[in-house]
Image (cartoon, rainbow, N blue to C red):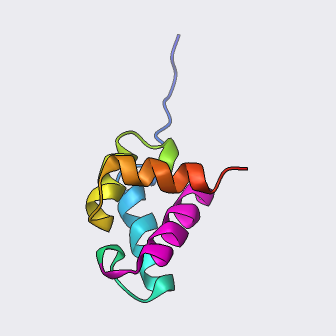
Amino acid sequence: EVVGGLRLPGVHGALDRMIAAVESELGARLADLSREDKQRAVRMLEERGAFQLRRSVEEVADALGVSRFTVYNYLNAGSP
């Protein structure tokens, strides 16, 4: 018998908040960053768990103004 439920706060809009935080830390919109800073932004987002969220690669690619393929390349470049 179910006697209660739990809704975890903060999942809705979490990626938008992560992107906004990275933009604030880097001092510019993701799309306006240099290639090196875009790579840095992707690493920062990865460290914060952004890519565990559904459709996050597509949304980050849109925010960066690059393709999904480019985001995957940035992610792979940061791997050993």
Instruction: Find residue 53 and report its image quarter.
Output: top left
- x and y percent of residue 67 in the render? 29, 53
* Residue 49 in sight in this render: no
**Position of 78 relative to 22 (above/below):** above
Horizontal side of 44 relative to 34 (left or right) equals: right
Magenta residues span 32-49
Left or right: 31 with respect to 40? left
* Vertical relation: 20 (above or below) 47: below
Residue at the spot 36% in from the left edge and 74% down from the top edge: 30
Q: Residue 33: image x %, image y %?
A: 38, 80
Between 18 and 76, the residue placed more toward the observer is 76
**Furthest-right residue in this view:** 80
In the image, taking residue 36 as reference, residue 19 lies left or right, namely: left
Does residue 36 appear left or right of residue 31 in this picture? right
55 in the magenta segment: no
Residue 33 visible in this rendered orientation of the protein:
yes
Please provide percent x and percent y for residue 10: 45, 54
Q: Main secondary structure of the magenta part?
A: helix
| Residue that appears at 34% across and 48% down | 68
Q: Residue at x 57, y 66 (%)?
A: 44
Q: List the single residue furthest toward the bottom.
A: 27
Q: Residue at x 51, y 16 (%)?
A: 2
**Viewer-side residue, 26 vs 76:** 76
Asked if 16 appears above or below 54 in the picture, the reply is below
Q: Residue furthest top?
A: 1
Place residue 62 in its image quadrant: bottom left
What x and y, as percent, mark residue 60?
36, 57
